[in-house]
């Protein structure tokens, strides 16, 4: 009985370890991309910063 439980436990541990290694390997090979900024957002942020600087002077 003890031997059966140990064999099943070792199999479960090996399966979990294999899944962790596969998941980590796939995560490192994933190609991350960044969406380009919208031109309106960039301009409005620059204008807001410029307006803040002008109001401080």
Image (cartoon, grey):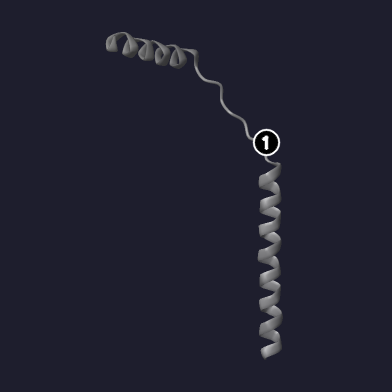
Give the labeled residue for mark 1.
31
Say left or right for 49 vs 2: left
x, y percent for residue 5: 66, 84
Tell me which residue sits at (58%, 28%) in the image: 34
Residue 24 is left or right of residue 45, and the answer is right
- Residue 35 lies, in percent from the top left, at 56, 25
Quarter location, residue 4: bottom right
Please tell me whether residue 54 is drawn above or below residue 35 in the rendered image. Answer: above
Report the number of numbered marks.
1
Q: In which quarter of the image is the N terminus?
A: bottom right
Q: In which quarter of the image is residue 43?
A: top left
Q: In which quarter of the image is the C terminus?
A: top left
Q: Which residue is drawn at 66% across and 71% down?
A: 12
Kindly identify the residue that appears in the image at 44 percent across and 16 percent down.
Answer: 41
Q: Is mark 1 on a helix, strand or loop?
A: loop
- Seen from this angle, which residue lies furthest bottom? 1
What residue is at 34 percent from the left and 12 percent from the top?
Answer: 53
Q: Answer left or right for 11 relative to 44.
A: right
Picture quadrant where residue 19 is located: bottom right
Rate crowding at label 1 as few (under 14), some (14 to 19) or many (20 or more) other CA atoms within 10 Å.
few
């Amino acid at each position: 009985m003890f031997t059966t439980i140990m064999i099943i436990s070792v199999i479960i541990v090996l399966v979990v370890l294999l899944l962790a290694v596969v998941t980590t390997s796939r995560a490192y090979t994933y190609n991350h991309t960044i969406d380009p900024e919208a031109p309106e957002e960039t301009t409005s942020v620059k204008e807001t910063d410029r307006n803040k600087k002008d109001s401080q002077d």
